[in-house]
Image (tube, rainbow, N blue to C red):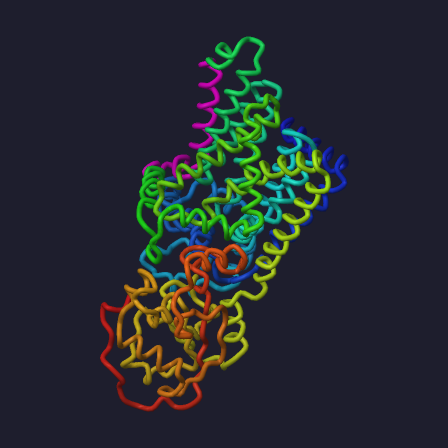
């Protein structure tokens, strides 16, 4: 079947680039390898909380329809929980093969139960669904993100080539491929990478519009910008970049800058295309639940005004920390130098300079918005990584042309150091602390050996998907010897942080309970209860060694030199949040109570 004409043109462009540039296939292959390496990590658990809800979103509609077949139930399913725009469409497409298998295996009731989670609780929701369904539901959604990540690398190549030449496109694509913050997000199901892909497409057509002046290119930019917004509202920066592109094209026009700039019909069509695309991209609007779209807007503008619940720092600290983690120290310095060099070229009149201004307008808009937030994570900065990679590539190619020895050395240093940094983080997926703890618990003990843990959300836990798991929302020490579990799993965020001094942070101050502190200390000391430490996984917190917090500069420097310090963020991006201790019972627990049952002080 023949492809539509736009897709035919896109296919021809890709084939032409692959034939004309012998390095491009290797760059794309490298992007595919590092984006998909150990993509099954944590399964059948989730990489982040957001990943769970993105996978579950389309299943909520399925569950609502099965409960009450009819068109009305479809809109009820769309309004069941927080549908996050076009990520629901992407997840639905990725889950189609799983749905076919589920129908063929009579597992539809268990599959649909994934979409019924309000009032169920995190743990029952996770454990009642068979592990194979979770695995084969989450994995294709992740693979869809990998495809979008590789596509993003190619669009960066195409944009750099259009702005200047193939050498610029190659280098920009290579720099994005070795950007750790980009690779992290390619390893989880979510909306960040798809939104980036369409944002970059919008940028590409904006640059091409400046080059040729063809109205259809601007409209394509509006379309893809709308899709980017439909995935993630921060994609709205595409409108800013298209606006800057319109200004630059007006300056180039033979009709005069004023006449070319004031084009009401042209601009109205572009705005309407964007609005229509955004509306079509939100299932809650299409499926008849517009109130959910309003809630999405409200949450987006309200949530970031509150400080992070576990660490309160100014916005500049969060931004710097996110860049250090996402890029590493050498590449971050390169980004700054590239941006400075680009600003120095703002007076030039060339397509390259216009492209640099458009890209930096996008970066500046993001940073201006982020400066008003109370916390910023690495994934929020993702679009700026790609834009800055383009800017840096232009600066490095120009330097290499003017001073070949210096330019080649700078390119080599940045690519090698960034590849080493990102490579170390990518390889770490094969040995994540929580996965190591799960592997130990899976391979040890009998079918009836209970595993006790105190983590509220299974996404934060380091336990297998098994009916052996006994999750305790509170530390019930009074009945601990009666339960006498075969294994106890203590994690940093929920258990061990009780031992931290109140000055350690807001979370440590909240987790102040002498009884719990004594219980956890006794377990770790191995001298009160018949338990011994069977394994410690991850980086041990300094407070367990009797050490205070490292100086701020040292913590920030470590973030930019050790990619594993923040594998994910929600809230386990605090460096040691994956630290897990597994304790194994070595004898009888005995009888008697140890202390009063804990009440509401346990959080």
Q: Which residues are magenta?
A: 263-292
Residue 85 falls left or right of residue 161:
left
Give the residue at x 67% y 28%. Answer: 9
The quarter of the picture where the C terminus appears is: bottom left
Magenta run includes residue 276: yes
- Residue 597 relative to residue 296: left or right: left
Residue 480: quadrant of the picture: bottom left
Residue 296 x %, y %: 36, 41
Where's the N terminus, which quadrant?
Answer: top right
Relative height, residue 341 to residue 431 (above, below)? above
Question: Which of the two residues, 225 or 392, is positioned nearer the viewer here?
Answer: 392
Location of residue 293 (image quadrant): top left
Of helix, strand and loop, which mostly describes the magenta segment? Answer: helix
Q: Quadrant of residue 338?
A: top right
Q: Residue at x 32, y 62 (%)?
A: 507
Q: Is residue 545 left or right of residue 597?
A: right
């Amino acid at each position: 079947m023949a492809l539509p004409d736009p897709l035919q043109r896109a296919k021809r462009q890709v084939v032409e680039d692959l034939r004309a540039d012998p390095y491009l296939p290797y760059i794309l292959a490298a992007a595919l390898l590092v984006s998909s390496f150990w993509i099954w990590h944590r399964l059948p658990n989730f990489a982040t909380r957001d990943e769970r809800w993105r996978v579950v979103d389309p299943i909520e509609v399925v569950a609502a329809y099965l409960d009450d077949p009819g068109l009305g139930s479809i809109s009820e399913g769309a309004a069941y929980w927080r549908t996050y725009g076009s990520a629901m469409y992407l997840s639905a497409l990725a889950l189609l093969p799983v749905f076919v298998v589920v129908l063929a295996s009579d597992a539809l009731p268990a599959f649909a139960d994934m979409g019924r989670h309000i009032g169920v609780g995190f743990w029952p929701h996770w454990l009642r669904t068979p592990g194979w369904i979770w695995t084969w539901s989450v994995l294709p959604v992740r693979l869809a993100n990998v495809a979008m990540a590789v596509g993003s690398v190619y669009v960066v190549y195409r944009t750099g080539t259009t702005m200047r030449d193939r050498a610029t496109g190659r280098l920009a694509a290579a720099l994005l491929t070795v950007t750790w913050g980009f690779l992290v997000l390619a390893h989880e199901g979510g909306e960040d990478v798809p939104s980036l892909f369409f944002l970059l497409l919008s940028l590409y057509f904006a640059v091409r519009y400046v080059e040729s002046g063809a109205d259809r290119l601007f409209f394509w930019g509006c379309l893809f910008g709308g899709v980017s917004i439909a995935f993630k509202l921060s994609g709205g920066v595409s409108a800013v970049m298209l606006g800057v592109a319109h200004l630059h094209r007006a300056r180039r026009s033979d009709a005069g800058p004023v006449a070319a700039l004031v084009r009401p019909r042209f601009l109205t069509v572009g705005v309407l295309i964007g609005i229509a695309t955004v509306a079509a991209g939100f299932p809650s609007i299409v499926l008849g639940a517009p109130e959910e779209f309003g809630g999405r807007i409200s949450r987006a503008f309200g949530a970031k005004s509150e400080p992070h619940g576990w660490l309160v720092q100014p916005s500049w600290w969060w931004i710097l920390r996110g860049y250090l983690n996402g890029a590493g120290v050498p590449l971050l310095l390169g980004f700054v130098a590239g941006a400075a060099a680009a600003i120095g070229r703002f007076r030039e009149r060339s397509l390259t300079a216009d492209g640099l201004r458009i890209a930096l307008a996008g970066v500046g808009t993001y940073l201006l918005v982020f400066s008003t937030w109370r916390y910023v994570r690495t994934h929020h900065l993702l679009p700026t990584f790609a834009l800055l990679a383009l800017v840096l590539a232009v600066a490095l190619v120009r330097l290499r042309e003017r001073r070949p020895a210096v330019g080649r050395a700078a390119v080599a240093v940045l690519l090698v150091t960034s590849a080493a940094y990102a490579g170390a983080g990518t390889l770490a997926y094969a040995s994540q602390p929580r996965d190591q703890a799960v592997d130990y618990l899976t391979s040890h003990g009998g079918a009836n050996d209970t595993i006790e843990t105190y983590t509220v959300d299974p996404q934060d836990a380091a336990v297998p998907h098994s009916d052996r798991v006994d999750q305790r929302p509170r530390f019930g020490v009074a009945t601990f010897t009666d339960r006498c579990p075969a294994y106890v799993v203590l994690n940093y965020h929920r258990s061990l942080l009780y031992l931290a001094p109140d000055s350690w942070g807001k979370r440590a101050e909240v987790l102040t309970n002498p009884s719990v502190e004594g219980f956890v200390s006794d377990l770790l000391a191995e001298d009160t209860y018949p338990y011994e430490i069977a394994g410690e996984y991850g980086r041990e917190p300094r407070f367990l060694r009797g050490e205070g917090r490292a100086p701020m500069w040292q913590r920030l420097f470590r973030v930019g030199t050790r990619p594993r310090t923040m594998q994910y963020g929600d809230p386990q991006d605090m460096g040691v949040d994956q630290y897990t201790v597994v304790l194994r019972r070595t004898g009888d627990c005995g009888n008697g109570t140890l202390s009063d049952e804990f009440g509401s002080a346990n959080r």
